[in-house]
Image (tube, helix red, strand yellow):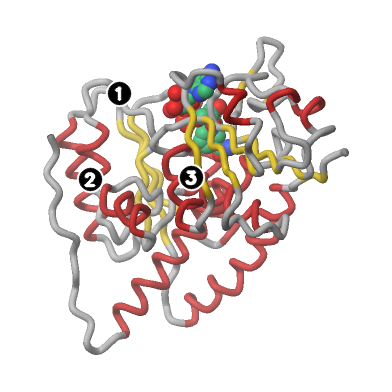
């Protein structure tokens, strides 16, 4: 069997075309969706990611507010910046580019973002929403994977899904989202013994470990759907995923390439969440009986 390719670039393009109508509709109501991206320091990879997000905003008619803070910015100043953006009605989404410099506590910063503007979905309120199945903003990468899976026409209910990688931004939310859709989910991570014993049972295998060549054909069930979230730069500069694409595509029924699979979807889902936030803010403003609502304050530590 040679796998069919799940084309993230094409799906991403289609979704972005659909955004135009929503942006126009918001414009008719006097609203331009706005996304604030905060970068602390000058990590080169982070600069590229932030640049991509700002560019995607421009292409989709979303106003971007790029806030670049020096690497030694005190945490209190980052929190004050977030408080200002929380109160700014022109800003519908706020994201802080990770990783942060070591003197800044990531959870304190993530918890400071209003749950109404948490378009990355990393606030504990939205994380908790994933557990019970009604998060406001699903985290972008797993959300993109879910839509890619949908394009295969597969109903995940009852399927064996194995997620390799248990990070807070990819593996864990991915597992929760598919559990919500009634898949039987296994999460593997660096301490999992005999990874292949788990992966071989997967009808759907999602890999987000950041280890090139981790998944080889012997570890994959014939006909499985394989989603490769990994992005790794090899010494020769080539970008590859975590899956041996050439080998595994001969066993899988569907597979995502790297690049061109999950990667393009992540930024697209960020724009989706920003549009959703702007639409939500508009609905709230228009509802006569709307009472401003805030999630309870969550204390750290
Ligand atoms: P992370 O380092 O935070 O987490 C990696 C996870 O993989 C951990 O749970 C770790 O235990 C597990 N792991 C590591 N080695 C393993 C092994 N040998 N066997 C099994 N599990 C193993 O990474 P992350 O932020 O979740 O990202 C994972 C990969 O996905 C990276 O390559 C990253 O660049 C990529 N990524 C891609 C996108 C995208 O848009 N496509 C978005 C986020 C992350």
Give the residue at mark 2: 111
Q: Are marks 3 and 1 in contact (CB under 8 Å)?
A: no
Furthest residue in direction right, as rendered: 1
* First of labels 2, 1 by sequence position: 1
Rendered image quadrant of residue 102: top left
The correct choice, above or below, for 137 with respect to 293 in the image is above
Is residue 49 rendered to the left or right of residue 231? left
Is residue 179 rendered to the left or right of residue 247? left
Give the residue at mark 3: 174
Q: Quadrant of the C terminus?
A: top left
Q: Is mark 2 within 8 Å of ligand 1?
A: no
Q: Position of residue 194 (x, y in %)?
A: 55, 18
* First of labels 3, 2 by sequence position: 2
Is residue 44 something that shows in the picture? no
Q: Secondary structure at mark 3?
A: helix
Q: CA distance from mark 3 to mark 1?
A: 26 Å
Give the residue at mark 1: 101
């Amino acid at each position: 069997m040679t796998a069919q390719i799940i084309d993230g670039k094409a799906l991403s393009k289609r979704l972005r075309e659909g955004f135009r109508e929503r942006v126009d509709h918001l414009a008719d109501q006097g609203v331009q969706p706005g996304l604030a991206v905060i970068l602390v320091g000058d990590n080169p990879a982070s600069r590229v990611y932030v640049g991509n997000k700002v560019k995607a905003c421009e292409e989709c008619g979303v106003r971007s507010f790029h806030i670049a803070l020096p690497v030694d910015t005190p945490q209190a100043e980052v929190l004050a910046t977030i408080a200002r953006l929380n109160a700014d009605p022109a800003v519908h989404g706020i994201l802080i580019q990770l990783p942060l410099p070591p003197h800044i506590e990531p959870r304190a910063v993530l918890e400071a973002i209003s749950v109404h503007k948490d378009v990355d979905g990393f606030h504990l309120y939205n994380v908790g929403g994933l557990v019970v199945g009604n998060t406001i903003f699903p985290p972008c990468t797993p959300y993109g994977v879910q839509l890619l899976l949908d394009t295969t026409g597969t109903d995940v209910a009852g399927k064996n899904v194995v997620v390799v990688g248990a990070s807070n931004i990819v593996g864990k939310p991915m597992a929760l989202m598919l559990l919500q859709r009634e898949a039987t989910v296994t999460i593997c991570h660096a301490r999992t013994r005999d990874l292949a014993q788990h992966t071989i049972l997967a009808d759907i295998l999602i890999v987000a470990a950041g280890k090139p060549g981790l998944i080889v054909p012997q570890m994959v069930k014939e006909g499985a759907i394989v989603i490769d979230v990994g992005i790794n730069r090899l010494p020769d500069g080539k970008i590859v995923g975590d899956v041996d694409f050439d080998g595994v595509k001969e066993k899988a029924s569907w597979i995502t390439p790297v690049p061109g699979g999950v990667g393009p979807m992540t930024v697209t889902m960020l724009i989706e969440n920003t549009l959703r936030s702007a639409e939500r803010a508009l609905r709230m403003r228009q509802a006569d009986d709307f009472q401003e609502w805030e999630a309870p304050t969550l204390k750290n530590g």
